[in-house]
Every structure is written in structure tokens, then in C-alpha cells.
Image (cartoon, rainbow, N blue to C red):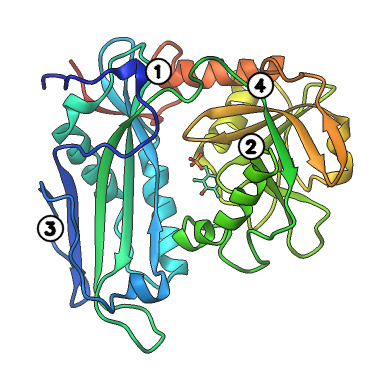
Amino acid sequence: MEKKNIDWENLGFAYIKTDKRYVSNYKDGAWDEGALIEDADITMNECAGVLQYAQTIFEGLKAYTTEDGRIVTFRPDLNGQRMMDSAARMEMPQFDAGRFVDAVTQTVRANAGYVPPYGSGASLYIRPYMFGINPVIGVKPADEYQFRIFTTPVGPYFKGGVKPLTICVSDFDRAAPRGTGHIKAGLNYAMSLHAIVSAHANGFDENLYPDSATRTKVEETGGANFLFVTKEGKVVTPHSETILPSITRRSLMYVAEHYLGLEVEERDVYLDELKDFAECGLCGTAAVISPVGKIVDHGQEICFPSGMEQMGETTRKLYETLTGIQMGQIEAPKGWIHVIESM
Ligand SMILES: *Cc1c(COP(=O)(O)O)cnc(C)c1O
């Protein structure tokens, strides 16, 4: 497909309408066969479940062009599985993970002209989501749902170079014990907006949310998991039932162990021990890893030895290895790269 006339290098992270989107409707206990459509607007009843009681979940992944000219996505089966887990927790019907991958493939193929070329650093962001659409006024799950996927081209995350982040320990909670922190639901984001606006107003890039029960352990930020590197070079990530299981974080832990030969550990990480780590990073689809230079815990500043100018050495190796795998320069573990179009 012919590429669209887009200034790939100067793309930001804003919605740009692409040609086709995927829609499947759930009614009378079953999903229909699904279709690609052109209309980007959704019409629904004023009393739709999603509008009244926020019954909505989503996923996020990227399609990009590899060095040898293929259009691929990274581990989309895990997004499909995670969306099934989110649906179950929200009393929504599950959209089969195999069908999910097929729908992602169809949608990206139909918008191939918007997939940025190799080397631009840009990608085609893919947003699958599902919501209750029939009128619901008594509090209960909807009976009818819509599953959709749209795509939008986005620019490189580290435009103008890598800048380590400054993070504050938030006074707000993100996820209740036994709540919904482990699923990708819009409701987790709605309640984080006040916290992030406040953090930005105070000059911070992100919030570190401690565990809500004791406020002594590190959980995650509003939209990314933490990785730490000890002074001995071990890669540590917090363990918690209320952290969203990031696919990037799980992939980085695998890369650390199996590609870089590092020791890895998933365990409780206490705020008290942050000062002992050599490096800190945030992981998620958007950036892969963003280095963290400083964490501020109510006046106490924790500055990581990697500093405010560059990625720490282990963080950089992790970043380069995973992005090398994604771009086809380093051999990927079996099943990690899903080919959508090979040139
Ligand atoms: C999506 C998300 C992440 C990152 O997950 P990836 O699968 O790596 O993109 C981390 N934390 C939260 C709260 C998220 O919603």
C-alpha cells in the first residue's frame, strides 16, 4: 500500500484519523463476525452502560516496520489474553484472543499506508477497546457490547534525545487491594487524572503510586511498570496483585535473564530501599523504557547514580536489546514477532 504523505519525523502523540477501523458487536449472547468500516464516529443511546457506569476496557500496542521492510506487531497474543482477563473482571463478554490477533492484523493491513517507515522511530499505535452500549440505568452489566480497534500514527517517544524523568511519590491511590489495578480499564485512568495534573503542576513528570494498603511498597505509575537495577547488576521489578502486568516489563525481564545473562527478581520493593538502587526505569509500550533520574518522596530526594543526562548502562542495554528484537536486528524468541505484511 502506498504510504500516506505524513511528516513521520515530526509526528507527536495526538489522534490522527486513519482510513479503516474494526468493529464487532455483541448481542443476544454472541459476537458477530466483525467488519472493517470507515465511520470513525460512534452513535449510542444516552443511557449506554459505558456512559453511566464506565464499563469499558482497552489495550494498546504498536505496528512498525522492521529493518527488512516487514510490518509487524510485538506479542499481540498477550494483549488479546490480557483483554480477556480485563473483560472477565468487568463482567463483560470475552473477545477471543485468537480473533483479537486476527482483528488487529486486518486493521493494520487496511491502514498499512499509515505505518511509518523503518528508521523514523515512529509507529502505528493500535487501540483495541470494548464497552457496554445498550441502555443501563439500574446498576448491572450491559447486555450488548461493542469491540473496536482504531489505529493512529505516533511519533518517536524520545524525540530530541533521552531525558531521565523526575517522579514524585503520590498522595493519591491508584489501585485498591482486591480492586481493578491489574486490569486495563478506563476507570483506573479516570481516577488518575487529578493526580497526574497535580504532579505536573508541581513540576514532576509522573507519579509513583505506593501500595494503597500500607503505602510502604512501590507499585507503578499511572501507565508504566517499574524496573530497578541493583548496584550488583540484578534487575528487580515489584511484585503485587494490583500492578497491571505490562507486556514490555515481562519481555524486558526475559531479555535481562536470557539475552544479557543478568539475575532477575520479582519481589516486594520498599520505598525505603529506593536509595540503594543504581538505576530505575519505567516500562510500557509507549517508550519501551524511560529512565528515571530522580524520585521525590515528600521532600526527600532520591537521585539515582545514572543521573539526569542519560540512561543507566543496564537500562540502555535492556532498551537496545528489546528494540533490536522488535526491529528484527536481533533474533526474537519464538512467537514474539507477529508479521502482518512481508514485503
Ligand atoms: C498499559 C499499562 C502498562 C504498560 O503495559 P504494556 O503492556 O507494557 O504496554 C503499565 N501500567 C498500566 C497501569 C497500564 O495501563
Q: Quadrant of residue 179?
A: bottom right
Q: What's the residue at 34%, 71% (across, down)?
A: 51
The location of residue 70, given as percent across then percent down, is: 25, 18
Mark 1 touching mark 4, by CB under 8 A?
Answer: no
Mark 3 touching mark 4, by CB under 8 A?
Answer: no
The location of residue 314, given as percent across then percent down, is: 69, 18
Which of the marked residues, 1 or 4, is nearer the chain's N terminus? 1
The 10 Å Cα crowd at callout 3, few under 14, some 14 to 19, many 20 or more, is: few
Mark 2 touching mark 4, by CB under 8 A?
Answer: no
What residue type is disc 4 on? Thr
What residue type is disc 1 on? Gly
Mark sitting on residue 33: 3
Q: Is residue 155 left or right of residue 183?
A: left
Label 3 and label 1: CA atoms lie apart by 35 Å
Q: Secondary structure at mark 3?
A: loop
Q: Which residue is mark 2?
A: 205
